[in-house]
Image (cartoon, coloured by chain):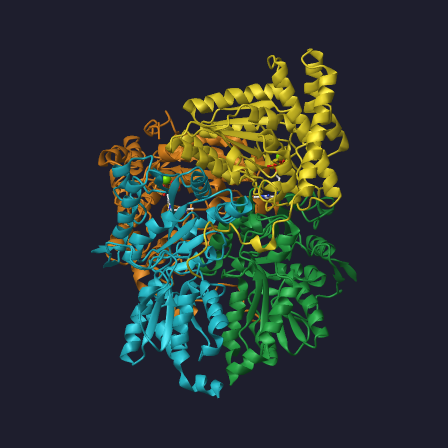
Chain colours: A green, B cyan, C yellow, D orange
Amino acid sequence: MRMTYREALRTALTEALSADPRVFLMGEDVGRYGGAYAASKGLLEQFGPDRVRDTPLSESAFVGAGIGAALGGMRPIVEVMTVNFSLLALDQVVNSAATLRHMSGGQLSVPLVVRMATGGGRQVAAQHSHSLEGWYAHVPGIRVVAPATAHDARWMLPAALREPDPVFIFEHAMLYPEEGEVGEEPGPLPLFAAAIRRPGRDVTVIAHGGSVGKALAAAEQLATEGIEAEVLDLRSLRPLDDATILESVRRCHRAVVVDEGWRSGSLSAEIASRISEGAFFELDAPVARVCSAEVPIPYPKHLEDTALPQPDGICAAVRGVLQPAQAAGAKA
Amino acid sequence: MRMTYREALRTALTEALSADPRVFLMGEDVGRYGGAYAASKGLLEQFGPDRVRDTPLSESAFVGAGIGAALGGMRPIVEVMTVNFSLLALDQVVNSAATLRHMSGGQLSVPLVVRMATGGGRQVAAQHSHSLEGWYAHVPGIRVVAPATAHDARWMLPAALREPDPVFIFEHAMLYPEEGEVGEEPGPLPLFAAAIRRPGRDVTVIAHGGSVGKALAAAEQLATEGIEAEVLDLRSLRPLDDATILESVRRCHRAVVVDEGWRSGSLSAEIASRISEGAFFELDAPVARVCSAEVPIPYPKHLEDTALPQPDGICAAVRGVLQPAQAAGAKA
Amino acid sequence: MATREAPPLPKTPAASGAIDAATARSWLGQMLLIRRFEEKAAELYSAGKIRGFLHLSIGEEAVSVAAIAALTEADNIVSTYREHGHALARGLPPGAVMAELYGKANGASRGRGGSMHIFDVGRRFYGGNAIVAGGLPLAVGLALADRLRPRPAITACFFGDGAVAEGEFHESLNLASLWKLPVLFLCENNYYAMGTALDRHQAETDISLKGGAYRVPSVAVDGMDVMATASAVRAAAEQVRSGAGPFLLECRTYRFRAHSMYDPELYRSKEEVEQWKRRDPIALFRARLEGGGILAAAAIEALDREARAVTDQAVAFAEAGEWEPVADLLKDVYARELPCG
Amino acid sequence: MATREAPPLPKTPAASGAIDAATARSWLGQMLLIRRFEEKAAELYSAGKIRGFLHLSIGEEAVSVAAIAALTEADNIVSTYREHGHALARGLPPGAVMAELYGKANGASRGRGGSMHIFDVGRRFYGGNAIVAGGLPLAVGLALADRLRPRPAITACFFGDGAVAEGEFHESLNLASLWKLPVLFLCENNYYAMGTALDRHQAETDISLKGGAYRVPSVAVDGMDVMATASAVRAAAEQVRSGAGPFLLECRTYRFRAHSMYDPELYRSKEEVEQWKRRDPIALFRARLEGGGILAAAAIEALDREARAVTDQAVAFAEAGEWEPVADLLKDVYARELPCG
Ligand SMILES: Cc1ncc(C[n+]2csc(CCOP(=O)(O)OP(=O)(O)O)c2C)c(N)n1
Ligand SMILES: Cc1ncc(C[n+]2csc(CCOP(=O)(O)OP(=O)(O)O)c2C)c(N)n1
Ligand SMILES: [Mg+2]
Ligand SMILES: [Mg+2]
């Protein structure tokens, strides 16, 4: 069935609230307003204010309350409006959600799902355009996924709710209105597996979330030049699906990582490092990275477009790693 | 002159407060208590409560107030007791300190210095042992340094105070009691340059802060085996001194990065990636990383020691990258 | 979730004093300018000239004008993402504000910030903060700097009712009071945080009662009454200026428009909005001025024409502006080029 | 920074009711156990058996015992890093607590947490939180879970005076009150946050006045008087249990020892400490019980001997414990092995 990413999320939320009385949704403006991105529109009317719970502007307290409610036997879904505001709750994530099971010697469980929007592209400037999911992916004790398709938006949520540990779902803000095919079933891919979105043989282009579409657009362009790029959608950022990544790179011998985070210290570095560690002698060129410029994302469209990864930049990076001169020279 | 890292910091703070009336020190227990790590002991008595200012437990407000005071023409030094608690103030750092200059079109300046302790090793368990300086190094608009020696503890602070932009100084908690030689002058190295702490030829071992000593210990051990490791102290985490790093790696052809952050998504990945990007065809083996285990750091000594990077692990990693079999096989 | 009482309409105090014609003209002119400027901005948004988030303060003009009237040029202002009114009342050139909304290089922040991030360091207008409550700690710091330098000035800090729920409200009021800093905390209570009504985000809906927890004197005022608000701000500012420490002034007001241009306004009834519109601060002030013989209808109409003309000039200024060159993207991330890396 | 009044000694209420011998024995026994246990822990720290941070609650035993006496087995407890007293009063086996301080695998948290992170899910003891104020949101969430499931229970949340300055205090009280959740907020006001005296971190030093900002009823009690504290907690807990929403109880007490074993105590005078020691909660209670003929001196001595004996057994248990194998380091980071990566 075709539906938007937003509708896919709403379908998933509706199903989750219907299926399990322990599930409830909580966050700023998830109820009366219908969700800042309208993902939860209509749910308050359907499930009532106990299960679709508007919160005050208190990110630390309501994320912490989500952790506490999970400890208390519920299956909370906490919506943090965007990753930008989630910084206010990061202490609760890093110091409580991520530590409680291990630190208690295995006694405690935090089956919490946190959803939030991430990423730029909507001209909402420096304080509303961060892509910080890479930070979350650094933290042991939590899981991090990023649905890039409507199908994954539909099916990652129920899978996340089955996890006994905290799962953070990053929804790229540009994806909500995107339409896609949503299957009746979750499909064969487990929650934490990467997906090959387009097979290829010349280069592996690795992306997640809002960058997957850009990678696919770049691959289309490259195909017209005779370059067959394989596009890999990470889907899960913690854990990373090393096996799928390395298998692809070993076939293509070249890789480009696309990441909307600022380049220095972004998740792209981890992926590039793992590729080098795992497939160094099969690489014909250093792994290239296409990331955001290291700048607070500016408001005007031309500057924002320049600051964020774009298909053209991905194409250029692919051409760079394919430059036979450089690669051949070195292998000689 | 020999002094402890703590005394070096105190010397630097005393000098800064004496030299510039715009400088003041603010943070939890910096005054009456003398500083959680005693770095500011005696300063309240010397400079009075206006300039050595105890704050309530309000990390977000007093870091934000430091930003505001910097905007207002002062040169605040804010001490956040440890990086663990700095998560509570991260919104102010990422969304205000780092953005204000750019977002205001160059109108605003935030000449703020923030000091904090980082790292594990003192058996203070999962909520007090983080090494999150790598996160800070991801953020454009701020600078990040990590003094690894008493000399740098003494001289990085005045250099940071001369910067027109926010500088974050990470002091590894294990270093405070360490003694070292402190020069009368800052020396030739600029604030943001890496230092070669031990010259070598076989492998570049890159570390910062509390890991530099471990890297040097490993190098001593390796020397007895005939392996000459060059130990590079990053000193600055943002910017990274690519030139010095790459120059060393191009000479040694092999590199090991030591980083007390959890492996996945740590700064070590960025460094390894940059090395691969900048010296791929000069590398004889993939860059290896020695990081913390991906676990909330446990309390008991034997587990904490296992979780953190240690000289033995560094030696093992160095031997790994030097394994001639693997390297030769691949070059063939 | 228990249902609590509906938000009370603010009471207009019996008398808010007299006003001379020059002041009346100035205040009404500013309120009209804000109104016309924002009406135009809404149009331009629909026309695609302005993008991203645009938060209008239509309905809340009295607070901007009254509050800033009580400040001197030496005072600092810390604002929010709903700050066109503050910026214009502070005297930022309307053209620079409009150009900022366009994202043009002749905008107040060189176009980089847009509607939510208007700065003017010369006018001590410290922005423009899109993190709810994010400005409060900055205001405390600005006031601390003034105290330490010392510099005789106060810092006025605007924030909404929604911001009151954030921890930073609490930490900042405590800090300012503990250190007796000259901060005037100005809460623009428009009874909604996005779609969440005051009584659904605050256990205690009377914000003016919250100062007590920090020994911060606080008062609520009818923010639809520009004269009442002005005298309340004046009194509060004087107290802050005297060195007595911070003050919390709650201005009860209402936004007539949606939260932002994205907002379908599912959370409130048309009737509620209409009811508040009967207390439109511009209409109320106008009626009082006309009724009291302070300004004639014709003079008021002239002010309105001027507001429209200034708005049109602002649009022309913005339209004529250049885009910042892409090559300058990385300019001013830092103050200086790096020595390395 | 203005100097404010010195922290007031708490007033002992005129009468805190009668007490039967069994209750007296139980409470005094627990207080003595906490005291002897912590005295021993301090010794063991000096001997190098315990490392890291060790925060003693000596002087504050009455609060732990009185508060937890008012709770049922179904109630949840959220504690702080100064939680040995809470854990022992909750009935955690002293051996498991001591072994945790050692870091042994037979410790309450398998030794991984140490002194600051004692958990016992069976006794609904949710730890042990080394982030000041970090436990308050968790308590709100536990109470929310109980409300939604529903499960008739309350959540008691301990925190210090220092925690009151954190934004999470503010956000949590508002949230709990807004949603009328069954949380009993228990502030252990010992007049210091590390080395920072109450009047140097709070603009309003009367913490019990802070509930008003959230419509949370609040009361202060003499935390050195176990009977007064017990009756205050009982009343507060009953109110919370009745569904009236949260309650803030401020227990005024004092720590006789340093903040942690690292603290040189430069910030307070010996005289101040001595003055407070004259109101040692154990001595006060003991005197009252002896004076009132409720327990004889010999019985009290027997309780003390028992406390020492239990402590010695706890030490023996800890000494006999094994270290967790290094191979188990990564166990329980997650509940299950990953399917990939
Ligand atoms: C920390 C943070 N959380 C959430 C948001 C999203 N958001 C923007 S405005 C707003 C409502 C704020 O309400 P209020 O403070 O009353 O100001 P108003 O918009 O009514 O002027 C919200 C939830 C944000 N910008 N910052
Ligand atoms: C968020 C945070 N900031 C700082 C610290 C360091 N610290 C530990 S205890 C403490 C004082 C807390 O005082 P209070 O809440 O009164 O509790 P008490 O120690 O007196 O029992 C401080 C500053 C911390 N653990 N967490
Ligand atoms: Mg509002
Ligand atoms: Mg205390």
Q: Quadrant of the N terminus of chain A?
A: bottom right
What is the count of numbered marks? Answer: 0
Compared with residue C235, is residue A252 higher up or lower down, i.e. above or below? below
Residue D277: give x, y in percent of width and height: 26, 36
Name the residue: 50% across, 71% down.
Answer: B277
Q: Which quarter of the frame holds ligand 4?
A: top left
Residue C76: give x, y in percent of width and height: 49, 32
Compared with residue C234, is residue D240 higher up or lower down, i.e. above or below? below
Res. D173 visible in picture: no
In this rendering, position of residue D18 left or right of residue C120: left
In the image, farthest residue toward the left: B1
Q: Nearer the viewer, residue C244 or D147?
A: C244
In this rendering, position of residue D265 left or right of residue D153: left
Q: Nearer the viewer, residue D76 or A147?
A: A147
Name the residue: 68% across, 26% down.
Answer: C32
In the image, farthest residue toward the top: C293
Residue B242 found in image quarter: bottom left
Residue B48: give x, y in percent of width and height: 29, 35
Residue D51: give x, y in percent of width and height: 31, 56
Compared with residue D219, is residue C134 higher up or lower down, i.e. above or below? below
Q: Nearer the viewer, residue A140 or D271?
A: A140
Q: Nearer the viewer, residue D67 or C212?
A: C212
Residue C14 found in image quarter: top right
